[in-house]
Image (cartoon, grey):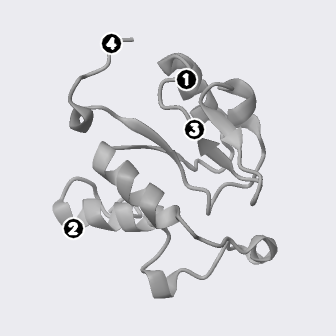
């Protein structure tokens, strides 16, 4: 595929590891894009151009919790930096959460959504 030379014009793939349930489906479908991260057993996009767009889209469509998102370059840099040193509480998965994020302003993905709403580039987080 032809990639834009301007990084800001491209879409990048991001896995919201806080919502990932570790089903492995994306990593099985798009093996050159996703892998299962060892520490928390969650998927991660490790190569932005590892598979064709169709294969990556199939992997996105396979995700049972819809935790794979398109982000801009600046958003990708933000969420990757926010993820550094993050500790995900795997036990809380049993009661509907992945970690307590209130003191951090939400998960990295929720912070991106909130910024998009503030900038008017996306409707409210719940679609209104």
The quarter in which the N terminus is drawn is top left
The image shows residue 72 at horizontal and vertical percentages of 31, 44
Asked whether the residues under the numbered discs 2 and 3 touch, taking CB atoms below 8 Å apart as contact, a structural biologist would say no
| Residue assigned mark 4 | 2
Discs 3, 1 touching: Cβ within 8 Å: yes
Spatial CA distance of label 2 from label 4 is 32 Å
Report which residue position mark 1 lands on. Answer: 50
* Secondary structure state at the residue bearing disc 4: loop
Residue 109 position, x and y percent, is 46, 61
Residues at badges 3 and 4 in contact (C-beta under 8 Å)? no
Residue 25 percent coordinates (x, y): 74, 36
Q: Residue at point 66% right, 41% down?
A: 63
Mark 4 residue crowding within 10 angstroms, few (<14) / some (14–19) / many (20+):
few
- For disc 2, the marked residue is 118
* Crowdedness near tag 2: few (<14), some (14–19) or many (≥20) residues, C-alpha within 10 Å: few
The residues tagged by marks 3 and 4 sit, at their Cα atoms, a distance apart of 20 Å
Question: Which quadrant is the C terminus positioned in?
Answer: bottom left
């Amino acid at each position: 595929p032809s990639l834009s030379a301007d990084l800001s014009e491209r879409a990048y793939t991001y896995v919201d590891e806080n919502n990932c349930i570790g089903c492995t489906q994306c990593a099985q479908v798009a093996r050159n894009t996703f892998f299962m991260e060892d520490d928390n057993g969650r998927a991660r996009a490790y190569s932005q151009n590892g598979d064709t767009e169709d294969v990556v889209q199939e992997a996105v469509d396979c995700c049972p919790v819809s935790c794979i998102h398109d982000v801009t370059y600046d958003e990708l840099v933000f969420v990757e930096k926010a993820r550094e040193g993050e500790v995900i509480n795997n036990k809380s998965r049993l009661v509907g959460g992945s970690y307590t994020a209130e003191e951090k302003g939400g998960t990295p993905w929720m912070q991106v959504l909130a910024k998009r709403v503030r900038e008017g580039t996306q409707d409210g987080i719940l679609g209104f």
